[in-house]
Amino acid sequence: MAFVYLCSISANLEIGRSNKTNLMLFAMRDFNAVKRITTAYIKLLFPHWKHKVGVNLDEFDRYCLQPAIRRRGVIKEQCHNIDPEFKVKMPEIRLK
């Protein structure tokens, strides 16, 4: 069941592109983390969404995607407070 959620999320999201390979690696790490947090929000808030067809994209963005991006941003800030080598800036993650 989790695979269905991840597939439907991956089909609806895209990440902003970067010219630097190293930055893109960290952006993909954040992108994957946001996908997993978003999946958790979907399972908790909208358990009736089983397929991509039943997903309301406005509700998905407001209640699942944006909170997931904010939560990942908090984690990045905490990592930056521990070690300044970690970047605070989140990559641009948006709906297609």
Image (spheres, grey):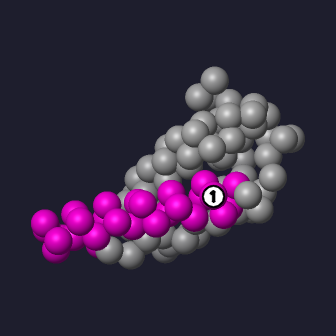
Image-based side of 25 in relation to 95, left or right: left
Quarter holding the C terminus is: bottom right
Residue extending farthest top: 1
Instruction: Please state the horizontal and vertical placement of residue 7, each as a whole percent of the image.
Output: 67, 37
The quadrant of the rendering that contains the N terminus is top right
Residue in the foreground of this view, choosing between 38 and 46: 46
Q: Is residue 53 visible?
A: yes
Type of amino acid at the residue the image marks with label 1: Tyr
Q: Which residue is mark 1?
A: 63
Q: State the residue at coordinates (59%, 28%).
A: 2
Instruction: Tell me the residue at 84%/41% (across/down).
Output: 54
Q: Is residue 29 magenta?
A: no
Looking at the image, which is closer to me, 89 or 73? 73
The image quarter in which residue 5 lies: top right
Q: Which residues are magenta?
A: 60-87
In magenta stretch: residue 72: yes
Q: Residues within 10 Å of mark 1 (few under 14, many from 20)?
A: some
Using the image, determine if residue 49 lies above or below residue 13.
above
Count of marks placed on residues: 1
x%, y% of residue 11? Answer: 72, 47
Q: Main secondary structure of the magenta part?
A: helix
Q: Nearer the viewer, residue 91 or 34?
A: 34
> As displayed, is residue 43 above or below residue 21?
above
